[in-house]
Amino acid sequence: MPKLKIERFASSIYLILLAAAAVLTFYFSYFNKPLFFIISGLTIVMAFFHSKLYRHAVQVYTFSLAIMSGLYGFLTAPYLDYPFPNALYSTVRLFVFDTDQVFTKEATKFIDYPPSIELARWCAVIYVSATISQLLMKAFGHSFQLQKMRWFGSHVVILGLNDKSATLAKNLLVNQRKVLIVSEENERMPDEEELVKSGAVILRMKLLSESAFKKSAIHKSKYIIAFHDQDGYNLDLVKAIDEYVKKTESHGERKIPVYIQQNHTITQHLYDKIKVSALEIHAVSLQSLVARQLLNEHPVYEHYESEARDYNGKPFHLLLIGFGHTGQQIAIEAIQRSHFFRQQKLHLTVIDQQAERLEREWRDAFPRLDDAAMLHFIQHDIKSANIIHQIREAVPQITHIYISLDNDEEDVLQALRLHQQFKNLPIYIKIQRDGHFTDWLHNTSEFSHLKRFGSWENVLTEEIVIRENLDELAKSVHEAYEDKAAKETLDYQKTPWEKLSFFQKNSNRAQVDHLDTKLFLLGLERAQEDDEPMSQEDFDKFLTQQKLNNVARAEHLRWNAFHYMNGWDTLPLEDVTNKIHKDNSRKLHACLVTWDELVPVSSRRGIDFQESDRNPVRQVFELTAIKKAEQ
């Protein structure tokens, strides 16, 4: 629970206890009735100012109650008249843990104090204790938190402070993670104070230094996050951390997960080549996370369910306006996961001022691009007056529009412009910062077909960046494949998940990303907590051979596209033997052919590769609880 919510909750509890105390004084004869009116009046006043006082609820409530109850007690309970100045002085003395004995003739401490004085002096004790504790925490809390992390570990170390790492840190703190940020002196953020108040510890030290690793107890961390804008610097950090962790006594079998910002797709192969023994590297492309979240929440088949299930339907046609890092990742994700019953390839049209250069770069990077999708590049200024005419002329069959230009304002302006002409099409707008305008846009029915994506607050979360759930499912996919291969192949050597390359891990993750699409094509959906999930027996009856083959064909198209978009090509049939069907070093695979062409490949290799595409369809039952989709 976030610190702010805890404070509000505690404040509400104190207010309830105060009200309960008022009820107690009314019903029990031990208390006198004026005390009831004092506590009741205080409860009403505190309730009125509750929203402003919650941060200091203990001090405000106990101080007020101690003063009021103490004054009342010293004015009414002494055996002789006690002047007001004396009563006030005696009340103040309660806060130094001393009570003036003016209630009996005998000057002894062995007496029963009046109820109002008992209440006042214990409230004074609580007030003083709470205030001292708060002052100590304010003065030494940062050091105490740091020391606690160094002793017990299991904290998250974030290397570098910028808007992205700060956003992720806030979301980690919401999940009650212990967060330690190591920041260079020149790295300053306006919301640093808010991070510290929420429980983060910030160290000002040189990132690439052993002293920073030692002081942050990086070797005891749960995981490490490095969000620097230069890939080379991130790799240097990884090597330095690995060397340090290996030297520590606490280094054992456990590998510390490290999440590194990957700024350029071309650098991915470097993460396979870097040799580390104490760390488990995860390359994180923030733009890829944005694209993944977009297509998880709004799959291409959304609003086009019947068309996606139509075997003879026209292909979906995506219009991408702006083809920077985010636009390119949307294209890659869409190509890799948008495969349905129809056998026609996905169509994409790109409009960008640098379209000609981008097309050359893409065709160099993805030689088999045309086998994965149909791409058309148009070099044009989106701000020009004739852009609508240009779009209608070049792309008459648009089904989706994705806008990801240089900034939020430009994205919104172009979306409003296009929405007038394409009111029946889903338009997805990249808006990274929250604001009143985006709230208004979201809540206005006229713009219901405009969908926002790309908010850093929604993307930079533990669930999306660390993605433990995704990796658990991906491991299950891998283990199922390994178990089946071991049964069918003599002397097969299983490869543990930790030994897989980045490409192999991502291949398993991509299969999980297609899970909801497979369920959709089958007419199933994920079961919720209050649903009765489908049994294995019912699933086996439901999954007819025709359904199995139809979805397996879609799975094969997805598998092909994933490999094409990762630089793989087809191993010629004549090179296939009863022992060889792929060459990892040259990125060649004999199964990169059509579904029907798998038959001769299977015959030469002695493995039923069509069955390999059916297995992921069967496996959907094992990966998640499912039920029949509501029509």
Image (cartoon, rainbow, N blue to C red):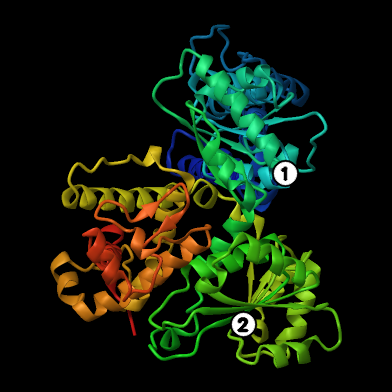
- Indicate the secondary structure of the residue bearing disc 1: loop
Whether label 2 touches label 1, CB < 8 Å: no
Q: Residue at x 53, y 83 (%)?
A: 316
Give the residue at x 79% y 64%.
407
Dividing the picture into quadrants, the one containing residue 441 is bottom right
Above-or-below relation of 512 to 628: above
Name the residue beneath numbered marker 2: 449
- Residue 60 shows up from this direction: no
* Image position, residue 162 (x, y; %): 73, 42
Q: In the image shown, does 337 or 452 lie closer to the viewer?
A: 337
Q: Which residue is mark 1?
A: 229
Name the residue rendered at 44%, 74% in the picture. Answer: 339
Of all residues, the one furthest to the front in this rendering is: 574
Q: Disc 2 on helix, strand or loop?
A: loop
Label 1: few (<14), some (14–19) or many (≥20) C-alpha neighbours in 10 Å: some
Q: Is residue 587 visible?
A: yes
Q: Where, by quadrant of the figure, is residue 390 drawn?
A: bottom right
Residue depicted at x 35% and y 58%: 575
